[in-house]
Image: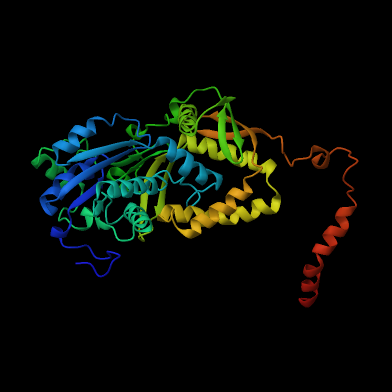
Amino acid sequence: MTIDGFGWRLPLTDTIKKIVVAYSGGLDTSVIITWLKETYRCEVVAFTADIGQGEELEPLREKAIRTGASKIYIDDLREEFVRDFVFPMLRANAVYEGRYLLGTSIARPLIAKRQIEIARQEGADAVCHGATGKGNDQVRFELTYYALQPGIKIVAPWREWTMKGREELIDYAAKHKIPVTATKSKPFSTDRNLLHISYEGGVLEDPWKESTADMYTLAVPVEQAPDKAAYVEVEFEAGNPVAIDGKRLAPAALLAEANRIAGSHGVGRVDLVENRYVGMKSRGVYETPGGTLLHAAHRAVESITMDREVLHLRETLIPKYAELVYYGYWFSPERTMLQAAIDESQRNVTGTARLKLYKGNCDVAGRKSPVSLYNPDLATFEADRVYNQKDAEGFIRLNALRLRAGARTRT
């Protein structure tokens, strides 16, 4: 039974009438539908979010029904994903622990949001996800569930069933004749969307071992990248990318094009050990070619359009913003507050950046803006009539006052 109306403790199995499960068709969720039917003996509705996995999702319909779901929703959320989740994060330049562009993290609040909407539509009293009890995703899903529907019941199979790992899930799938692509020799856990693809598990659990070549999906190995550099121009309006090489594109199409261009030059592959919210370190390999390109381009346009103090203040907010996304607090009041401040800083971030792509590198080659704060008459090392260099002497002496006073006390 529950402790109170917020459902902090999972009710007895016979009190759940209908569950909406976030269904990807991968190993975990393929097993989950059958397990839910066996364990809870209630109706199960599957929900698959199309956020740019790059695969045909329609076959999941038959698979979900065959394994026990009464119906399945397959919703195209690609435009909403990029417009309302990826781009706000891009405006904040969010990077977790200096390297991770948060490709998996930013997808979870959207999936969970739509899952709650379907639960309301279906009259379901519970939702379910396939995240393990060791990872971050369980937190991201459940914080969103509770933020949007405080009294929802949550089923988290990895925290309930007796199976201890992916090999046992593979055995369970074989026993119940559930088709899965994972094998005991290649048990990688992957997550893909329009922003990135991630790999965890298998050989990657040894941080000393190099990732294998067959993991490359979005970015070609640098050894196979073209021997000639390519240039690409990205145009921004109020902090949002709106065009690539002069062609205006809707958000999802723009990110897909950025992935194609940057990926063909081996850009955006990262191998890192990160600190999970639950307390452990975890090693993962990420490919984020388009995100890497847009991030570099965005910073380039910011450099000539943002006031110095506004930019510096915004820089102090980036680690906190990235942490909130990584931990799963997208729908928190503090993230909303930070977003408002960040978006205010982006009003004049309008212009174009030119990037040079070569063998995995993404370097800024130029930037311009109709509202640029860069004044070549001030910055020049040649003779000018705008800046009186003698003024710098008083500026320096005033700023040195406290240093000189402190020095006297030490002599």
Horizontal side of 240 relative to 211 (left or right) equals right
Quadrant position of the N terminus in the picture: bottom left
Q: Residue visible at 62% across and 45% down? A: 346
Judge by depth and name the residue closer to the eye, 73 or 178: 73
Horizontal side of 349 relative to 256 (left or right) equals right
Judge by depth and name the residue closer to the eye, 19 or 349: 19
Q: How is the image coloured?
A: rainbow
The answer to whether residue 152 is above or below residue 69 is below
Q: Residue visible at 83% across and 64% down? A: 398
Judge by depth and name the residue closer to the eye, 181 or 47: 47
The answer to whether residue 206 is above or below residue 143 is above
- The answer to whether any part of residue 269 appears in the image is no
Give percent across and percent down for residue 138: 31, 54
Quadrant position of the C terminus in the picture: bottom right
Horizontal side of 39 relative to 140 (left or right) equals left
Q: Residue visible at 39% across and 46% down? A: 110
Give percent across and percent down for residue 285: 38, 42
The quadrant holding residue 329 is: bottom left
